[in-house]
Image (cartoon, rainbow, N blue to C red):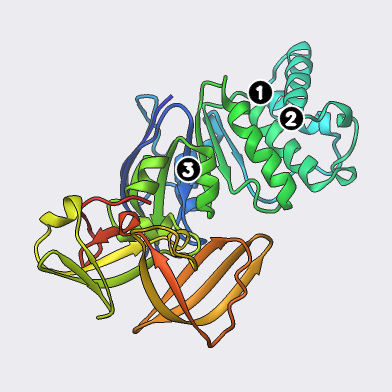
């Protein structure tokens, strides 16, 4: 099953909600839409489902132009982050409802409901009402109802966002297994880069209605083609710092310097931006190639076994993210370190140059 958007855009009351987008989704594994709130993820999914007709362009599914074909006549399932279940029906009847609408036989309905309930670990709850379930069980019910009909296209719009941490982790681990043997196109929307990495597959990085990059998830993360794609795929935000290259030396804020290596040696002298993800900026310098950055602590956030420190260096504000508890005092000077091999280099306008790792 293949889904392709051909130069699709959406304008509402003169405002661009989706800019011209051409995208051919992978027909196996997860297709993740990654972006902040209001980036356009839900709108793009509604266009894919047929809930919204694009202002221009076409939607093709499995070799057929389905632009304007209403969702009621298409084999599509969608799960939202809110728990949407019929409150007066049991779990069994909730899961069975799309099969009854499709006029499936009684024996077939019973077999498929029980099969899906077993997959979603709802066997013992089939006679309960949604009000008798936990949040995670309610969301499992909503997902079971969406999946039981064997849809050609399954759209999951931040389905785990309203669950507590433990339930999110459990369902996130189960999702790839649930879809492993299903022949359908799966689209998953999230605001969390870590969730996209865990799901694997392919990721489309969205920013203000634009798909800034699409490709295998690991590749988009490690080798983004633009600073904007790197920003979408970084939480906490990536550090984007001006640097100057002269005579094979990079200089940052007139104080930190390092020698260009590898492909960076071939770059012309001039001004660039260096991108460093916070987990590559550390309060300890064990690496022999580490470059020191002298800064002043602005904010310290301690969470469990992790420390996030905001600090100033020159005219720029940096973010460091590290394992362990580093209780640095706000206002005090501190030295941080990074390895240039982890740097991503961009032009001043944000296009990727050279080679880097992340």
Q: Are discs 2 and 1 less than 8 Å apart at CB? A: no
Which residue bears the numbered disc 2? 120
Q: Which residue is mark 1?
A: 102
Would you say residue 293 is visible in this rendering? Answer: yes
Rendering coords of residue 152 (x, y %): 52, 26
Badge 1: how crowded within 10 Å, few (<14), some, or many (20+)? few
Q: Nearer the viewer, residue 349 or 276?
A: 276
Q: Nearer the viewer, mark 1 or mark 3?
A: 3
Pointer 2: residues within 10 angstroms few (<14), some, or many (20+)? some
Quadrant where the N terminus sits is top left
Q: Which residue shows up at 65% across the image and 52% down it? A: 161
Residue 129, above or below 264: above
Is 56 situated left or right of 71 in this image? Answer: left
Residue 333 screen position, x and y as percent: 48, 84
Residue 330 in the figure: left or right of residue 84? left
Q: Describe residue 38's horizontal placement relative to residue 272 as left or right.
A: right
- The CA distance from mark 3 to mark 2 is 21 Å
Q: Is residue 207 above or below residue 54?
A: below
For residue 83, say whether it is visible.
no
């Amino acid at each position: 099953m293949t889904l392709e958007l051909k130069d699709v855009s959406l304008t509402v009351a003169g405002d661009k909600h989706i800019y011209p987008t051409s995208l051919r989704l992978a027909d196996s594994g997860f297709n993740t839409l990654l972006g902040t709130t209001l980036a356009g993820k839900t709108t793009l999914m509604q266009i894919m489902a047929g809930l919204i007709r694009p202002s221009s362009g076409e939607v093709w599914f499995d070799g057929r132009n389905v632009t304007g074909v209403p969702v009621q006549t298409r084999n599509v399932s969608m799960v939202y982050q809110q728990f949407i279940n019929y409150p007066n029906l049991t779990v069994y009847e909730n899961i069975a409802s799309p099969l009854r609408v499709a006029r499936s036989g009684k024996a077939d309905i019973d077999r498929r409901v029980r099969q899906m309930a077993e997959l979603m670990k709802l066997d013992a709850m089939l006679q309960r009402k949604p009000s008798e379930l936990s949040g995670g069980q309610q969301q499992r019910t909503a997902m079971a109802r969406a999946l039981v009909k064997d849809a050609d296209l399954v759209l999951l719009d931040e389905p785990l966002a309203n669950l507590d941490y433990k339930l999110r982790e459990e369902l996130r681990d189960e999702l790839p297994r649930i879809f492993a043997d299903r022949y359908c196109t799966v689209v998953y929307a999230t605001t969390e880069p870590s969730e996209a990495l865990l799901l694997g597959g392919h990721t489309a990085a969205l920013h203000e209605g634009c798909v800034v990059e699409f490709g295998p998830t690991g590749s988009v993360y490690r080798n983004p083609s633009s600073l904007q794609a790197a920003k979408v795929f970084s939480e906490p935000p990536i550090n984007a710092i001006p640097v100057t290259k002269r005579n094979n030396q990079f200089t940052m804020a007139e104080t930190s310097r390092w020698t260009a290596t590898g492909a960076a040696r071939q770059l012309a002298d001039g001004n660039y931006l260096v991108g460093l993800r916070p987990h590559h900026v550390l309060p300890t310098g064990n690496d022999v190639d580490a470059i020191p950055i002298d800064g002043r602590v602005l904010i310290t956030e301690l969470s469990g076994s992790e420390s996030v420190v905001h600090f100033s260096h020159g005219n720029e504000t940096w973010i460091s993210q590290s394992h362990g508890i580093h209780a640095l005092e706000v206002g005090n000077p501190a030295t941080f370190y990074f390895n240039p091999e982890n740097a991503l280099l961009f032009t001043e306008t944000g296009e990727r140059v050279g080679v880097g790792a992340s």
